[in-house]
Image (cartoon, helix red, strand yellow):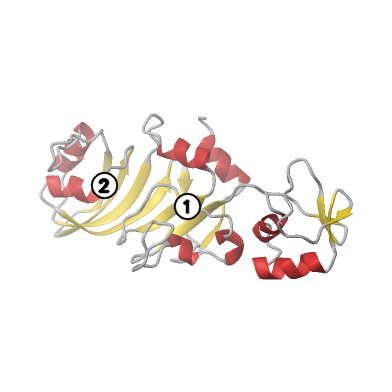
Amino acid sequence: MRIDKLLANMGYGTRKEVKKVLKAGIVQVEGEVIKDGKTQIDPEEQTVTIRGEVVEYKPYLYLMLNKPQGVISATEDNEHQTVIDLLAFEHAVYDPFPVGRLDKDTEGLLLITNDGKFSHALMSPKRHVSKTYYARVRGEVTEGDVLSFKEGVTLEDGYVTKPADLTIKQSGSVSEIELTITEGKYHQVKRMFEAVGKKVTYLKRCSIGQLELDETLKLGEYRELTDAEYSLLMKDE
């Protein structure tokens, strides 16, 4: 890894700012002053210091975002704001990406990382990681729907969903529900309700596995996962 990229990733400034730090002669690798930002180092094997203070190397980033509506789950887009656009420079320099996706008009818990193994583990169909949503639905959601979802509903393309756990919070012309699924087909929650003649008007993801959205995060805000939260997600690996 280039020394300038390492320092930028570890929060020591933009590439331009890091260049100034290097030129100042205060960066050392194994006791040797390094001024060239292109210098290749192995941060796991070599000790890097700035003014004698050791630079703690952290290769991976794990973020919990409360995604707002209108923002797309992508790394870049020419027309729309992406979830990566919401990140501060010190996190964006890790070249992170969203774990899975939330639709543009869906809010709630989205994980962002640069760790491909972590992302694959959570998205792998073999693991059946559950995802729980809160939704407002136009139309009366009934116990018959609860049973249908538990058995699996047939979507418009003929696909039969895996069993899902539907809980009715409030039933009426506009119902409030909680739904837990273990797969992630395109627009799946919306399509499941369309299959029983109803329409989702608001959708929020509340949890992934046993990890719940930190409700202190306002829409568009994020924070790093704690070690305990990471372990919670990866406990079955």
Residue bearing the label numbered 1: 97
Count up the numbered dots. Answer: 2
- Residue 176 in the image, given as x and y percentages of width and height: 25, 55
- Residue 74 in the image, given as x and y percentages of width and height: 40, 56
In the displayed structure, does residue 8 sit left or right of residue 200?
A: right
Neighbours of disc 1 within 10 Å: few (<14), some (14-19), many (20+): many
Residue bearing the label numbered 2: 186
Q: Amino acid at mark 1?
A: Phe
Residue positioned 27% across, 42% down in the render = 185
Q: Furthest residue to the left?
A: 197
- Residue 123 in the image, given as x and y percentages of width and height: 41, 39
Mark yes or no: residue 116 visible: yes
Q: Amino acid at mark 2?
A: Tyr
SS for callout 1: strand
- Residue 45: name its quadrant: top right
- In the image, residue 1 above or below residue 215: above
Question: Closer to the observer: label 1 or label 2?
Answer: 1
